[in-house]
Image: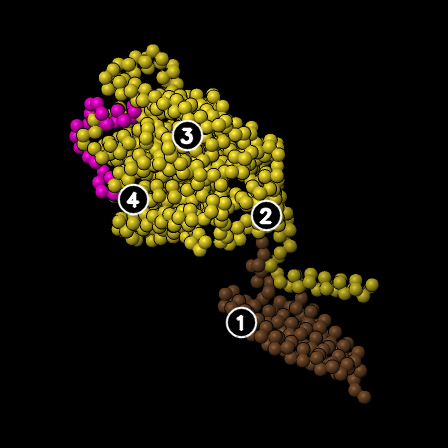
Amino acid sequence: MSVPLPYYLGLSAVLFAIGVIGVLSRRNVIVVFMSIELMLNSVNLTLVAYSAFLGDITGQALVFFVMAVAAAEAAVGLAIVIALYRNKQTVNVDDINILKW
Amino acid sequence: MTTIALAPLAVLLPLIGFLVNGLAGRYLKKEWLIGTLGSAAVGAGFVFGCILFNELLALPADDRAHVITIFPWIAAGGLQSAVAYQVDPLSVTMLLVVTGVGFLIHVYSIGYMHGDPGYWRFFSYLNLFVFAMLNLILADNFLLMFRGGEGVGLCSYLLIGFWYDRDFEKGTTADAAKKAFIVNRIGDFGFLIGMFLIFMTFGSLQFQSVFGQAGKFDIGTPVMVAITLSLFLGATGKSAQIPLFVWLPDAMAGPTPVSALIHAATMVTAGVYMVARCSLLFALAPISLQVVGIIGAGTALFAATIGLVQNDIKKILAYSTISQLGYMFLALGVGAFSAGIFHVVTHAFFKALLFLGAGAVIHALHDEQNIRKMGALKGPMPVTYWTFLAGALAISGIFPLSGFFSKDEILWQAFAGEHWILWAMGLTGAALTAFYMSRLVTLTFEGDARWASGTHPHDAPGTMAVTLILLAILSVLGGIFGVPASLGGGNAIGHWLEPVFRPALDRLPHAGAENHTLEYVLMAMSVGVALAGIFIARNWYLKRKDVPETLSNRLRWAYTTLLNKYYVDEIYDAAVVKPVVTGSEKLLWRVVDVHVIDWSVNAIARFTAAVGRTFRLVQTGVIQSYALIFVVGVVAILAWILAH
């Protein structure tokens, strides 16, 4: 007997919460960025779990889309981080607050 | 039938001419090329007109009205309006006049505008004007006619202000152009109201549909009176009648060929044409017809008296134009529609001739327009003198020149229709016309030379002289189209136009049986007063030069009143222009605009800014705080969904 569905969902929820907390509390952009990846992957986990549980392949297919988009997002995000660092010599989000009134 | 379908080409060619000269004229450089292009576009229109005329003549009289639809223009609910041209005897007559006289004036302009830096601009405007005018006269519905009217108004504006950097009277030519445009706008307002009423009443703006339905209305229906009076207001604007005539004398600020083409031969007859086109509507509203007649006769007399004392050669001709237009409306008012159109035709010949002759004189004397500084030009300018004389005799109504037949037909119809007062006004006007035209000829071409001794006036060269001669021939012989039965003629133009006006004529009271003896007496009277006018003018201005002097001194107030054109400009200025300007400035600008409109707009802006100042504090720039709010929002929504 395999692992029951609620376990997957619980793990996924925990991972997601960790990701949210990381995004909200960490000050290093790279870490914030990794936390976002964590959130994405927790969602992937949910999708795969449901896919297996329901016997529907759609969930797995969607995961590939998510991963593809996440890869693209990672490329763009890292590029932004590098550009940011070149301009401000910092990756601390508290110091990057020019988008305001 | 097939060639009739080609009628739109006559309209299209001037448009092409306008586009070519307007877009490429700057680069064409060669004056003869620009001029030939412009003239050819109009001349081809004349050829088409002749073909159409022939085609229509071959058809039976009742089968001469054709509509050629080009494309649907506006289709909005009940309003269906197409760009469609109506070919019938009336529109073809106008087509021939506009393109024929227009062509000659184009040719004249080739010489007259020589050396002008805006040469190509001039010809493109002229072609645009002809295009708009042809739209006006060939239109088969009120909307297209209106658009044509707007077009000629625009071209008139552009051409009056053609020399926009020159001074004119108290202002610049641009002021004169603006005046013409604005006064015409008032008339257009009336025309618009008329169109609205027509659409409300008949549900259509198409001539055939409107006139077809109008036939079922009783004579004197109030709505007909309202429609026709509104339309007539439009006509007074375009055709410079009381009370909207004030723009035409100022229109003389433009180059002389413009005065000849637009402000004498063609555009100003638009109002006459429009009333003639709507003759059925006017016949159904006898009151309006009476108004038309009274305004016409009044204007004829009024403008003629002003013309008596003016000293600017173009001003005299301008007032004479207003006066002659008055005759045309007088004719329409007494139900002599074809006589009115006949006068349009002959007037186009001799007034174009007179203006072009005046242009030659002005040219020869280096832009001198004051007839007191002319005189004795007969010797150095024989061609101009003889052609001008022919035009002057024609407009004075001397037998057997063209003006005699058309003017006499109008007076005879007025008399036969028992409009005694209108007839008397017309006859007096005819005497005055003969007087001031003769005064003009005498002071300009005869007597002593009063121009500076350094100038060497000479006849206009080449194209200009040829046009003068051609127009002079037309002015002399133009009457053959309408020789009345009493003089052994067939009144060809009357019969030609008769199918167009028959529905209207059927609804008008018929004049009594023809009375040739009476007609002869009246003819003799009008020629008599004309000869008297000429004789008196020649006597006063050649031999007894003291008489005008003493007369003007003894009747000082009358003289100054006439010299100042009855102070109409001043009255309008005080009664309309000043209040509008002052009211606009003191009330509309300084109170309404500044304290109401601007204030409320500024208040809205200030309010928006204040709100923005407060709420923008939310934007901290720290991404994580946005993300926090986002998460809180998501959690709240999830909680709400789970709770329900």
Q: Is residue B231 magenta?
A: no
Residue B432: percent from the left, percent from the top? 36, 22
Distance of mark 4 from mark 3, alpha carbons?
Answer: 32 Å
What's the chain of the residue with tag 4?
B
- Find out whether the residues at labels 1 and 2 contact each other: C-beta distance under 8 Å: no
Q: How far across and how far down the image is residue B349, in percent?
A: 34, 36
Amino acid on which disc 4 is placed: Val
SS under mark 1: helix
Mark positioned earlier in the residue sequence (4 or 2)? 2
Amino acid carrying mark 3 in the image: Glu
Task: Specify which label sits upstream in the sequence, 2 or 3.
Answer: 2
| Residue B450 included in the magenta stretch of the image | yes
| Residue at image location 43% in from the left, 29% down from the top | B410
* Circle 2 residue: B79
Report x, y in % for residue B418. 49, 23
Label the brown chain with its letter. A
Whether residue A24 can be seen here: yes
Secondary structure at badge 4 equals helix
Tell me the residue that label 4 is attached to.
B107
* Residue situated furthest bottom in the rendering: A1
Residue for badge 1: A79
Report the Cα–Cα distance between label 1 and label 4: 74 Å
Tell which chain the image draws in yellow: B
The residue at which mark 3 appears reads as B409
The answer to whether tags 1 and 2 share a subunit is no
Residue drawn at (51%, 33%) of the image: B232
Q: How is the image coloured?
A: by chain
Kindly identify which chain the residue marked by label 3 belongs to.
B
